[in-house]
């Protein structure tokens, strides 16, 4: 409420019947009220405060003086805080009202004190006047007497003077003691009152309150401020604290053109060198230079909060570089935007955000990152950022571009070298446009819809050296460069990081993984990219571990590209609606016949969820006279060979994998090279590894096959003996040439026999004749081990004479 002008003091004279006496001033608490009857405080409970009046239980006696005076406590009980909604108008107004109420009471005290002092002065004056009258009488009497006794009278006068002086001193001391008993001397009260009035006037001008005027318990606000302000500055440092008044005015006037590099860089320098607890970096800024956060010593401040956006005013190599050390957290978002647009040629900023790279920035956590319009990489992290959680990353228009607006070139003067189908096969071409000299990633080109790795660039001669042959029919043509990425992870040892989501649009690579130990990505979304997900640094580089939870691709040239020939151990749990026909393996070289020279599957050692099933590449088919089989290989597909004579070496088993995964069995299939005898091989020999046996021997050989040979190879658990068995899908059949006799209607031929190796009593037999049976039935059965009996029976109404043909018996 507002405090009206009022005097918190009133006196009444009782009439013996009235019990209620109006206050005529504000007072909402009886504890703030002094009630006196003839200057004596009534007993507790003798009165109450009701509706702005003091109500006595029993009417005071007639003629009694009733004194009512407000006395607000010298205190402030509310402790305002920023987190509990206590700094609200009702509480603040109440505290300010108390101040003004007390000032009114001080004015009353001043008034009463003046009355009291005036009364004391009046009593003193009356007393002195009385003494003076008496003295004058005495003097008159003395004058007569003096005439008689001058010497004696003079002595009496001197004694009287001394007496009066003593009495005056006593009176002065008595009055001063009475004044001091009031608690504050009048001159002190006047002085403080004038000071308060001056300060209040100044407050009205300044729009604030004097800190020494507000007291909490035994500490005033000035002392509290002296403690709190340095603490606030230490624990709540903001990027805005580093803007000068002039810079802040300029920024507000033109935020899209103001160069905020200086205050932003000074802010990051300060929080890196000083532990401010939590730093606040919230705002959208433009900068003409790249920002560097931290260095070799990392950042002493380990927590930054805010939605921080920087946009380039001109060409910048790297917009934001973070060397934060260990255990740093950015809660909020870091957004870096370069120059240009969708077109690669329009983008003059090279890299958006580099996290780590030179100094360790490990075990960090960043809630959100947004990068756009960079000629090479949006977000780059390497092995020095190990165990860092990057949260959600949105990247757009980064790298060499996708189709429209990409970096392209025309090529000619093709020169091939090396041998067909080998790693020595190379192609060199001349180009009219070279890629950038400094690249954050390895260089690939797309020729004829296929992806190829570039071994080297000869800038002087403007040639590219490809690591394999490409389409032999293309001697000239056009190519598109593929480098850079929306998100790049690279480096060697221990670069295991995590991304909650990578959302890439119109990037060369949406996510390019060149790490030895790849990150883990919960969701990867790629739209209108050259390659949504590329894995591998170079043809020979390894990439171990890593996984993508869900891969979603739309309208991209390639969805998954394997960029290395080395084994992987990467998994993609689900590919959503992805089309794996748009996935590829770089380095698909050519044979002299212009067919693919790569015989291993593109996704070898890379598992992928596809329409509810987990797919992994199968073992390659070997066209060789010698081979091997490893029963515990993680590739569980059957091992297949095309050869007539096969010598198989069984690999030494890894007992740890057998114990963990029960990988103690593998299937092997051997196809003969000619179809003349049902692709039947001649011999298959199995050789046991050192320290083991196969079927109880160092080696075992199988012969006399009737068709394709299928084997089960298993380790007899708990022993050192491999068991190899020729299994049931081997075809048991035989043929003979036979000329059936002429058969009259209702007659049958004499029973004939033929040898079918592997036939046993009770086996089912399928019989066939390679000539028209003309209604005659051919019937066969197993009559003894390895023996099938058969005959022709004419169940027609006419005589039938069949021509000579081939009879085939097949055990089923």
Image: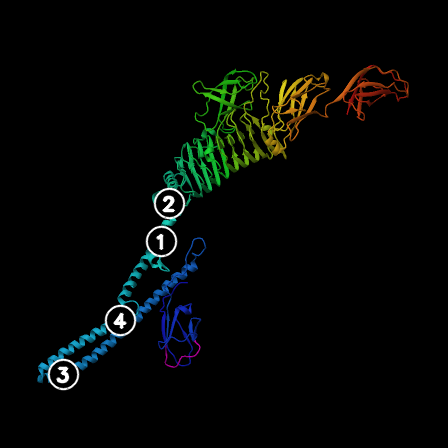
Q: Secondary structure at mark 2?
A: helix
Which numbered dot is residue 177? 4
Residue 690 appears in which quarter of the rendering? top right
Q: CA distance from mark 3 to mark 2?
A: 87 Å
Q: Is residue 549 magenta?
A: no
Residue 633 seen in the figure = yes
Residue 467 vs residue 11, the one in the foreground? 467
Q: Is residue 400 left or right of residue 777?
A: left
Residue 759 vs residue 246, the one in the foreground? 759
Residue 96 rendering spot, x and y as whole percentages? 38, 61
Which residue is painted at 78% across and 17% down in the image?
A: 735
Residue 234 vs residue 451, the one in the foreground? 234
Residue where numbered disc 2 is placed: 241
Residue where numbered disc 1 is placed: 225
Which one is earlier in the sequence, the residue at label 4 or at label 3? Answer: 3
Which one is earlier in the sequence, the residue at label 3 or at label 2? Answer: 3
Highlighted magenta segment, given as a residue range: 56-65
Circle 4: is it few (<14), some (14-19), or many (20+) Cα within 10 Å? few
Q: Is residue 23 left or right of residue 632?
A: left
Q: Which mark lies nearer to you, 2 or 1?
A: 1
Q: Secondary structure at mark 3?
A: helix
Q: Secondary structure at mark 1?
A: helix
Residue 178 vs residue 251, the one in the foreground? 178
Residue 264 rendering spot, x and y as whole percentages? 39, 40
Residue where numbered disc 3 is placed: 140
Main SS type for the magenta part? loop
Q: CA distance from mark 2 to mark 1?
A: 18 Å
| Vertical order, 103 against 664 (above or below) | below
Q: Which mark lies nearer to you, 1 or 4?
A: 4
Circle 2: is it few (<14), some (14-19), or many (20+) Cα within 10 Å? some
């Amino acid at each position: 409420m507002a405090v009206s002008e009022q005097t918190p003091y009133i006196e009444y004279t009782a009439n013996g019947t009235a019990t209620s006496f109006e206050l005529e001033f504000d007072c909402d608490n009886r504890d703030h009220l002094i009630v006196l009857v003839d200057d004596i405080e009534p007993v507790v409970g003798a009165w109450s405060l009701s509706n702005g009046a003091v109500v006595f239980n029993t009417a005071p006696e007639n003629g009694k003086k009733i004194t009512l005076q407000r006395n607000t406590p010298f205190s402030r009980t509310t402790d305002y805080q920023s987190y509990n909604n206590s700094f609200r108008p009702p509480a603040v107004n109440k505290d300010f009202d108390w101040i003004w109420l007390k000032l009114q009471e001080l004015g009353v005290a001043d008034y009463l004190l003046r009355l009291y002092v005036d009364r004391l002065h009046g009593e003193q004056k009356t007393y002195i006047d009385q003494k003076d009258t008496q003295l004058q009488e005495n003097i008159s009497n003395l004058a007569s007497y003096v005439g008689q006794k001058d010497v004696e009278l003079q002595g009496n006068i001197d004694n009287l003077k001394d007496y009066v002086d003593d009495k005056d001193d006593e009176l002065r001391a008595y009055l001063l003691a009475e004044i001091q008993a009031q608690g504050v001397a009048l001159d002190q009260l006047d002085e403080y009152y004038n000071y308060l009035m001056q300060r209040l006037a100044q407050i009205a001008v300044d729009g604030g309150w004097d800190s020494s005027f507000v007291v909490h318990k035994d500490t005033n606000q000035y002392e509290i401020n002296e403690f709190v302000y340095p603490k606030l500055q230490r624990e709540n440092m903001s990027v805005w604290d580093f803007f000068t008044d002039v810079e802040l005015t300029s920024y507000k006037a033109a935020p899209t053109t103001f160069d905020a590099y200086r205050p932003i860089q000074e802010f990051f320098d300060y929080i890196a060198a000083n532990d401010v607890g939590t730093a606040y970096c919230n705002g959208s800024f433009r900068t003409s230079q790249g920002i560097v956060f931290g260095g070799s010593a990392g950042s002493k401040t380990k927590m930054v909060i805010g939605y921080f956006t920087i946009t380039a005013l001109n060409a910048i190599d790297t917009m934001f570089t973070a060397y934060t050390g260990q255990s740093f957290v950015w809660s909020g978002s870091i957004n870096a935007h370069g120059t240009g647009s969708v077109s690669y040629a329009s983008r003059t900023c090279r890299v958006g955000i580099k996290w780590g790279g030179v100094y360790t920035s490990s075990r960090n956590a960043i809630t959100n990152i947004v990068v756009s319009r960079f000629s090479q990489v949006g977000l780059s992290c390497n092995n020095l950022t190990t165990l860092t959680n990057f949260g959600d990353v949105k990247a757009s228009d980064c790298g060499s571009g996708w189709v429209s607006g990409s970096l392209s070139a025309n090529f000619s003067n093709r020169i091939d070298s090396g041998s067909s189908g080998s790693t020595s096969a190379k192609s060199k071409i001349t180009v009219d446009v070279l890629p950038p000299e400094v690249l954050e990633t390895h260089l690939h080109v797309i020729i004829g819809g296929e992806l190829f790795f570039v071994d080297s660039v000869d800038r002087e001669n403007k040639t590219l050296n490809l690591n394999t042959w490409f389409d032999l029919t293309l001697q000239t043509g056009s190519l598109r460069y593929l480098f850079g990425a929306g998100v790049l992870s690279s480096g060697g040892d221990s670069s295991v990081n995590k991304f909650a989501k990578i959302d890439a649009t119109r990037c060369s690579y949406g996510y390019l993984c060149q790490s030895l130990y790849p990150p883990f990505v919960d969701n990867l979304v790629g739209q209108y990219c050259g390659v949504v997900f590329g894995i591998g640094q170079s043809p020979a580089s390894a990439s171990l571990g890593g996984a993508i939870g869900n891969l979603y691709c739309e309208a991209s040239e390639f969805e998954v590209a394997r960029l290395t020939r080395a084994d992987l151990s990467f998994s993609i749990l689900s590919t959503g609606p992805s089309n794996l026909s748009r996935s590829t393996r770089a380095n698909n070289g050519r044979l002299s016949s212009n067919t693919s020279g790569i015989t291993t599957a593109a996704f070898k050692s890379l598992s992928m969820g596809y329409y509810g099933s987990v797919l992994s590449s199968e073992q390659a088919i070997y066209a060789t006279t010698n081979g091997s089989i490893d029963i515990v290989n993680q590739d569980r597909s059957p091992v297949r060979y095309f050869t007539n004579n096969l010598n198989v070496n069984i690999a030494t088993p890894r007992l740890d994998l057998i114990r963990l995964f029960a990988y103690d069995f593998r299937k092997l299939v051997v196809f003969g090279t000619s179809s003349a005898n049902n692709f039947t091989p001649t011999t298959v020999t199995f050789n046991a590894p050192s320290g083991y046996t196969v079927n109880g021997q160092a080696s075992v050989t199988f012969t006399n096959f009737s068709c394709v040979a299928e084997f089960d190879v298993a380790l007899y658990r708990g022993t050192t003996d491999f068991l190899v068995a020729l299994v049931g899908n081997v075809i048991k059949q035989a043929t003979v040439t036979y000329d059936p006799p002429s058969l009259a209607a209702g007659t049958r031929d004499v029973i004939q026999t033929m040898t079918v190796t592997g036939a046993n009593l009770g086996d089912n037999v399928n019989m066939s004749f390679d000539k028209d049976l003309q209604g005659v039935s051919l019937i066969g059965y197993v009559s003894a081990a390895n023996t099938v009996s058969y005959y022709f029976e004419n169940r027609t109404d006419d005589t039938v004479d069949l021509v000579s043909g081939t009879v085939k018996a097949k055990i089923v």
